[in-house]
Image (tube, rainbow, N blue to C red):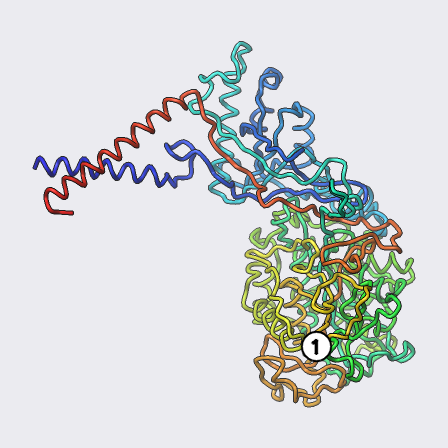
Amino acid sequence: MKFLSSSLVSVVASSFCITSAAGDKTLTLDHPFQTSFKKLPQKPCVSLFTREGRIGCGTSDRESMVGQVLSWTKLMNSNYYNQIAQKLPKFVAVLGEHEYNAQTVEQIIANSDSSLLQGILVVNATSSDGSSSQGYYSPAPVSPRGEDSPSAQLTPDNGYAWNTYGDGLILKDMYGIPTGFVQDSRIAEYMYNAGDQQATDFIAKLSNENVNVFDEEIKKFPPIMAEFDLYMGPEEMNSVDCLSWIDNDGNWRPKCLPLGGTSVYATAGTPYTRGDSNEEKKPIVIVGTNMDATAMFHDLSFGANSAAGNILAVLMAAKLFGESVTDDILDGLQNKIMFAFFQGENYGYIGSRSFLRDVAYPGFECSENGTVPALAKEKDKENPKMACLSPLRHDLDFMDLGNIQHMITVDQVGILTTENTFYAYDSTGNNVLTGLSSDDWTVAASSAGALPPTPLSSLVSLSGGNVGGMVLTGYDDAYAAKSNYLSHKDTAASGNINLEAIAKAATIIARAALVSAYGDNYDGSAMNTIPDLDADDEDFKKAANCFFEDGNCDLLTNFAKMERGNMRVTHDADLGIGPSLGKPPQYYPSVLDSRNGQPFVQVDGKSYGAYNGDKTYGENKDDKFLVRPNLLSMSLYGLLNDYLGRGGLEASGDSNLKKCQSSSECSKVSCSSGIDPAVCTGSKVCVCPRAHYHLALDEGLVASPNNSTGVFIPSDDDDSVSPMYTEPYWSNDIGVHVYRASGSSASWTLGVGFVTAAGCVAASIFLNRSLRKQKLY
């Protein structure tokens, strides 16, 4: 018994030592041996640069900014704030997400010594902060992309107040105020309560003028601190200076990348033969929308109503159109229909202006001798796909489009301000959209008298108002309150998204496209050619799940993987499938480089963002143009081919579709146009290609010739009207570290630690010897 007792003590002692060494996993900083969240899980508010300066957040220099976490609301609501303000240490303001707005930020700045405020932590809604009961909010300005914004010169009717719940925080320069959003609800609640309790302690003790802020009686434990490492460049910085940065050795080393990516478009019907004269081409009607969103915290750009709903509506409209109207019918109509998804629209209409300027306003011009086959191995092929070396364009098929007749766009149709009612802005005078009302759904003319900011804004602006179009919206004269426009709260989880409305919007858009294709020849008889799309349709539900819930879904992944495989077949290159949307999906456009949609050319084994060097492209048969879009662009590309490319087969009809695993199995499938060979889609069938990628890059920038990708310079044709958004390079070490500061007891605690460690060693030795003596070891 004596041995057993000794052994038991030894085992308990050893267990204590092991447990202590392993650390306590409980979510608190109040337990022994757990003093830190090494890297607080958070989403940073980052800096962006424009032509005129900077917006967003960041530390004032490379040194960490450290402060005690304190609830700002608790401090401000105290009757003793004036006394407290004189005694505060360096602090980090903790705010519930409903408290974080432009007014509160201004209040913090106005009522705090700038040397004391070290940052802001915004925490997700929790039961303790009561934020779930708060009202609607948007950090975007009242006039989105309008007056007092970097995009003001590009937006018609730029003074109209569409976003009545907006306060413009997203455009504020908060240099020196690093800010992070804590999304995890458990950590958020802990941080909120910690800030609240520490603020309560200060209020209780510092209301007495004789109490010192560092008095140990103020708190039960040493304070919880937050340390920000979020350096985003110097204060006086803009995009031009950042892109032209010269280091101390006199070398050109840009410190940022432009925002952008890859837009996607596809034409319905038989494509034109490359090089046909414009007289032979029909006018184009573009059915388009944005494919991006943003928010104060870019990693939380969920954009359920401002992006996902728009994408879903236009994609399903393309599906309805492709299933209902054959190429033979389309080829006989007055106008040609294009479906398009434009990237970077929230940052100065990057995608739509890039595309429209290349197509018509004023039209793309390749450098002398710069037009070459996109694949050098096809240079002897009849009518190969062409590209341009500088300014680099990997696909020049957009030069074979006809004149733009008008544009149909869609905006925020997932949340309706009036039940079963859409609103239409129409500058064509044809009242096409309002004529598509039904017994159950109404399309009413907008009462706003202004054009909402959509890709149509680019067309109106670039054409000088000579070419217009229509916008189908879920709002009349102001955005819906529930939309939480460009806020991290614009999610499907809010329960506000109306899938039935999006399905109906897709039907209306498809019918409007068909009416537009008929043009002056429309007599009303083709109205029912496009069937109603039901929200219970399986394809619709799968796509909705992808765009609202799971951006890593099988539908998008399978189509992107197939496009990856198609590139292996055609280009002998495997660039992967690019970044996914995540779960839930987020739609921030990202920076533009070779991993995120920047096209590039390979000349004699080296890659360039643009090229006009001494070596001749095409002398090496492996010379080629390549692009790796993100997963969203790749999947939309494949889906548009699938929806619009079946009608171009010489033996059309689903029963005649050839099954395939890769495009190499489609070599014997004939397309009526004969321009490009059939391709395999994510549906594992061979179709005729209809989709194209297009570079989405600020019109004031071009890729620097003869340099690697990710290097940009101002364009010679820059007219200084675009915002030129760029994002600085980040350190790999950025983040927020939260820990409990060491108190006055640190020295004796260290001593106790040494004693405990020695005891652990002694207990282990004793246990080992006892077990050996009893022949149990």
Tell me: 111 left or right of 201: right
Q: Residue furthest top?
A: 210
At horizontal 42% and vertical 23% (from top left) the residue drawn is 220
At horizontal 42% and vertical 39% (from top left) the residue drawn is 27
Which residue lies under the disc numbered 1?
644
- How many marks do you count on the picture? 1
Q: In the figure, residue 280 lies in which quadrant?
A: bottom right
- x, y (%) of residue 756? 29, 30
Tell me: 216 left or right of 671: left
686 or 491: nearer the viewer: 686
Task: Look at the image and tell me whether residue 162 can be seen.
Answer: no
Q: In the figure, residue 46 lies in which quadrant?
A: top right
Tell me: 466 left or right of 101: right
Residue 160, relative to residue 102: is it above or below? below
- x, y (%) of residue 571? 67, 74
- x, y (%) of residue 535? 60, 67
Sort mark 1 into few (<14), some (14-19) or many (20+) by Cα contacts within 10 Å. many
The type of residue carrying mark 1 is Leu
Q: In the figure, residue 24 lies in which quadrant?
A: top left
Residue 614, relative to residue 748: is it above or below? below
Quadrant the N terminus occupies: top left
Q: Secondary structure at mark 1?
A: helix
At horizontal 37% and vertical 32% (from top left) the residue drawn is 32
- x, y (%) of residue 476? 76, 53
Residue 588, relative to residue 281: is it above or below? above
Task: Look at the image and tell me whether residue 222 can be seen.
Answer: yes
56 or 394: nearer the viewer: 394
